[in-house]
Amino acid sequence: MSAEPAIPRPASARAREFRRILAEMLKIDRVRGGIVVAADGLVITSSLPRTVAVEPLAALTATLGRELEVGADRLKRTPFHTALFSADDGTVFLGSSPVGFVVVLGDREVNVGLVQWALRKALATLEGAWGPQSQIPASPEDI
Amino acid sequence: MGLLRLLSRIWDAITSFTRPPNAATLFRRADLIRQEGRFEEAAELVAHGLRLSPNNGVGHLLSAYLHLVFRQIGPAKSEFESVLALDPYHPRALLGLAKIALEERDLAACRPFLDKALQYYPDFPEAKALQDMVSSWTTAPAAPGQRPVYAGPPIQVEKLKPPAGGREFVLAQVDGTLVFSQQGDKDAEDLAGHVTQVYRIATATLQRAGLGALRRGIVQAATETTFFRTNDRLILALSFPQDVKVGFGLLETDKLWTNSLRELGVRA
């Protein structure tokens, strides 16, 4: 019940935190890659299959994240936390944070609930470095 | 002479620690720490640098990027324009303005920025990705009141009733034409515009990732969860309160999707 504001971590720890978060996401079975991209499209860290070019995907995911943010604002909705978009051969997961967007690519058999849960945990970690922690369900089944 | 030169070098090295850094040094440092995600510190350095060198294109470009990171779109636009005032063909400033135009759903403004960036720098991957995406859009989402009118088969509204708890149900064609909505006209047009834009960008993203065509989407926000269902002709979006179980939302969205396709005489 503490109302104390979150203390920002030392800034130099942030880059390491991004890399650690992405590495954790990549440990999930059937996750094929991921990017942490700032809202301006800057790639902070990435790990993608060789067949996928980083910069174009980062530009598109940042644009998608911004449309979800701007659209929610325009429609007077609350800002989005996470999103996923599925196709025949896999799923793109997107998480929003003050830093930018965490993007995860899963193949067609990826455990969607598990990735969503891990993504929320990752976003809470990022928010911890910037602001208040958000609520995370205790397990993927609670989503 | 050798001793003098050595002393001079030592003196230069000592004074370099106490001498205030010049603008170029500040911008270099700012760019490095920006790449680590240390945006607040980078913004301070850039502001300092621009006070020393107000007409520095690199400084204005970094400033524009940092405004975008902080979601300050007006100032970002102004900074990109400052870069173009110094260098009218700066590809990254052109890309920045293209992205802002896209956010503002101003496709007529977006396309020329991308074309110009690629005219001089044809191997600019980010600009090429966005150009490929927007070139496939037949029309921009129209301004309110100017949206194309649905001219398909008539729809029996009672057959497209959303489930309990379902709200903001909208059905649109992939060109942005509103087919059916649960809401009033103005809100429905805005919603259809957003849904169409999400569909278009998500489709491009999935294709770029080599995953195929968009079929489903789920967007979770603090107060609602929105489910998308699409094919290459139609987009359905349906929202529920945030605490909806994903399985229930998917099931109900699928039912409504099936009913919608049947009603419109479209094969799944």
Image (cartoon, helix red, strand yellow):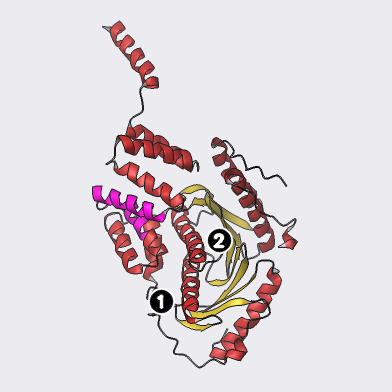
Under mark 1, the amino acid is Pro
Majority secondary structure of magenta residues: helix
Quarter placement of the C terminus of chain B: bottom right
Kindly check if marks 2 and 1 are in contact, taking CB atoms under 8 A apart as contact.
no
Q: Residue furthest front?
A: A3
Q: Which residue is mark 2?
A: A79
B264 on left or right of B23: right
Q: Name the residue nearer the viewer: B170 or B262.
A: B170
Q: Name the residue nearer the viewer: A49 or B152.
A: B152
Q: Measured from the top left, where is residue B1 in percent x and y?
A: 26, 6
Q: Measured from the top left, where is residue A9 in percent x and y?
A: 59, 38
| Boundaries of the magenta span | B73-98
Under mark 2, the amino acid is Pro
Q: Which residue: 40% across, 21% down?
A: B17
Label 1 crowd bin: few (<14), some (14–19), many (20+), radius 10 Å: few
Q: Chain of mark 2?
A: A
The quadrant in which residue B21 appears is top left
Q: Which mark is residue B236?
A: none
Q: CA distance from mark 2 to mark 1?
A: 23 Å
Dot 1: element: loop
Q: Measured from the top left, where is residue B183 in percent x and y?
A: 54, 80
Q: Which residue: 57% across, 86% down?
A: B261
Q: Measured from the top left, where is residue B2 in percent x and y?
A: 29, 7
Is residue B85 found inside the magenta-colored segment of the image? yes
The quadrant in which residue B248 appears is bottom right
Dot 2: element: loop
Q: Which residue: 38% across, 34% down?
A: B26
Q: Which mark is residue B144?
A: 1
Q: Chain of mark 1?
A: B
